[in-house]
Image: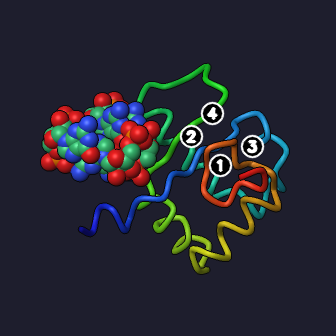
Amino acid sequence: GSRAEASGKIVLDLQRMQGVPAEEAAPLIRYAQSIQRQRGDYGNKVLSIRGEDLRALALMFDTSLESLTEKLVSWGVLAPGSIGHPGD
Ligand code: C2E
Ligand code: C2E
Ligand code: C2E
């Protein structure tokens, strides 16, 4: 169904998130921080986000899912276990 299509596991490496280009990556940083806030989930090294959140992020970046994933890869913020992780 639609849930399976929307799903594509994205695991963000929160440590590496601190090294992304601040201005360009601002929407990603804000989004991840608000998910942490909503979950009350602090002190972890990684943050798994919903596949559908990646879709929402692509809209915010005014780009496609594919291009956004490439951006995340180039910023080095995808932790092992993510789709598109270079080591997979
Ligand atoms: P919600 O979407 O109604 O989810 C309620 C609770 O269901 C979550 O509380 C969590 O305990 C559980 N849950 C939801 N999705 C998953 C999942 O993929 N895996 C597991 N193991 N449990 C899940 P939690 O985590 O305290 O989140 C509270 C609310 O914060 C959520 O209510 C949602 O509105 C928002 N939220 C949290 N994380 C995300 C996220 O990654 N994306 C979005 N869009 N909203 C999120
Ligand atoms: P997904 O929706 O793409 O979520 C990917 C991962 O983000 C989840 O992996 C979980 O680690 C995290 N996540 C998403 N939303 C929340 C949240 O509200 N709170 C917390 N704490 N974590 C969240 P997970 O749990 O292994 O789930 C894998 C996939 O299984 C999900 O992908 C979703 O497609 C499906 N799924 C799991 N539980 C439910 C559910 O209760 N209802 C529905 N409709 N789908 C579910
Ligand atoms: P729950 O785990 O208490 O989750 C309640 C609601 O939180 C879900 O209602 C859904 O709206 C949201 N949610 C939970 N996990 C996820 C997720 O991974 N991604 C997103 N985007 N939202 C999530 P929903 O879908 O009607 O599911 C009702 C209940 O059915 C869930 O209660 C859970 O007990 C079970 N369930 C449904 N799908 C799955 C699944 O894929 N895996 C598991 N383990 N349980 C599921």
3D distance between C-alphas at marks 3 and 2 = 11 Å
- Given the image, on which type of amino acid does mark 2 rest? Gln
Identify the element where label 1 is drawn: helix
3D distance between C-alphas at marks 3 and 4 = 10 Å
- Given the image, on which type of amino acid does mark 3 rest? Met
Discs 1, 2 touching: Cβ within 8 Å: yes
Residue carrying label 2: 33
- Ligand 1, seen in the image, is in the quarter at top left
Where's the N terminus, which quadrant? bottom left
3D distance between C-alphas at marks 2 and 4 = 12 Å
Would you place residue 68 above or below residue 76 in this image? Answer: below
Identify the element where label 3 is drawn: helix
Q: Which of 75 and 30 is in front in this view?
A: 75
Name the residue rendered at 76%, 59% in the picture: 73
| Apparent side of residue 30 relative to residue 70 in the rendered image (left or right) | left
Residue 79: percent from left, percent from top: 69, 42
Identify the element where label 4 is drawn: strand
- Given the image, on which type of amino acid does mark 1 rest? Ile
Would you place residue 46 above or below residue 79 in this image? Answer: above
Residue carrying label 1: 29
Mark 3 Cα shell of 10 Å, populated few (<14), some (14-19), many (≥20): many
Determine which of the numbered discs, if any, sits on residue 57 in the image.
Answer: none
Residue carrying label 3: 17
3D distance between C-alphas at marks 1 and 4 = 13 Å
